[in-house]
Amino acid sequence: MIFRHLIGSRFRVQRLSTYEKKRYQYPLMSSSARPQAAEPSNKRLSVDAKRGVTYVDLSFIEEPLGLSREQGYGFPRLEFGDTIGPERRYRIIRKLGWGMNASIWMAFDER
Amino acid sequence: MNVPDREKRYVSVKALKGYATELVQRGVMWELAALQRLSSTWTGPPSDHCLRLIAHFIHPGGAQDGNHLCLVTQLLAGDVRTLQVSMKNNAFPLPLAKRILLHILRGIEYMHRYGVTHTDLKHDNILFDLGRLTTADVSAIVEADPLRLNPPEASWDSTVQSAVSQPLPLPSSVEDAMTRTYLIADFGSGKNDL
């Protein structure tokens, strides 16, 4: 339970180069066919001994999911096939991209 | 609204992060109001060179993510920065540069006529439409490019997995790029100038 002891924290949101990204990507497959996922290695802990503060650095391939609204984030966690909006009218097809304030999705208007 | 048929089925949804949604709700960010003003038809025909809002709604997120304001617009094919990088020597041929600039200027003229100042005009925020691509073409593109997820990543209190960005393909040629309509988007830094 490392996080319980955290006094300070900071986040680093880093865009990886296209080459690095390619290495990380793999096609969406059933969980049994998927290569065994390694333990996420995007977290670094560092200790400032003088101040007695432990920092956690998180780097993300794309938008930093899971960082809260209070921390200035709160990116949407949409999934392929989700139906959102009034009368669940828009079906999420794929992610087109993301920016500082939002992620952009292609959707199908079911009407 | 006079929207070509292909744009009635596929749309683009910009889902704001919880923090940005709050800023819009508190009136700090003016994105929704700016888009609404530029998209309203009673002020006259909307411009082809400014992003137009089709619908908007709040999508509830988890407790810590907050709510997501979703802005529904026509599906667009890409941005001018990515297009420029794809060009030989990172340079647009003169006729294409003139087309893009003309469309931007028309967009700015329309925007300013209705009292909207963009304040963040840059090539990332100039988008282009699908050109001659039909709904069937878009479906074929989607089917040919299977959905992908990034590997799991550690986050604040959980492991997360983001989707890989899979934008539509760039125009296949300069001739193709010359058939596209260019328009101003991302009014997240917009200011009311009335």
Image (cartoon, coloured by chain):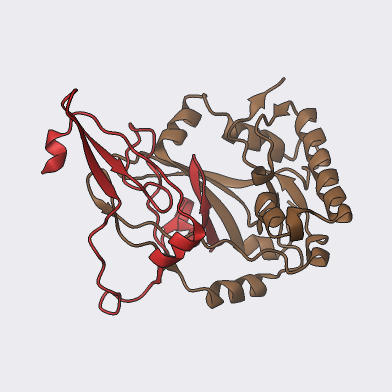
Residue A8 seen anywhere in this rendered image of the structure: yes
B154 w.r.t. B193: above or below: below
Q: Which quarter of the rendering shows the N terminus of chain A?
A: top left
Q: Is residue B146 above or below residue B5?
A: below
Count the labels in the image: 0
**Which hue belongs to chain A?**
red
Q: Residue at x 66, y 23 (%)?
A: B192
Residue A92 makes an appearance in the image: no
Question: In which quadrant of the rendered image does the C terminus of chain A lie?
Answer: bottom right
User: Percent position (x, y) of residue A98?
Assistant: 50, 49
Q: Quadrant of residue B84?
A: bottom right
Q: Is residue B165 left or right of residue B192?
A: left
List the single residue furthest toward the front: A50
Residue at 34% across, 33% down? A71
Residue B93 placement (x, y as % from top left): 84, 56
Pick the front one: B29 or A83: B29
Identity of the residue drawn at 51% across and 24% down: B28
Image position of B186 (left or right of A101): right
Nearer to us in this view, B9 or A103: A103
Tell whether B148 sits left or right of B178.
left
Front residue (pair A33, B191): A33
Report the residue that reaches farthest toward the bottom: A33
Q: Is residue B68 left or right of residue B91?
A: left
Residue in front for this viewpoint, A19 or B59:
A19
Q: What residue appears at the point 38 percent right and 33 percent down from the top-left corner?
A: A72
Q: Specify the chain shown as brown.
A: B
Image position, residue B112 (x, y; %):
77, 29
Q: Percent x, y for residue B82? A: 65, 54
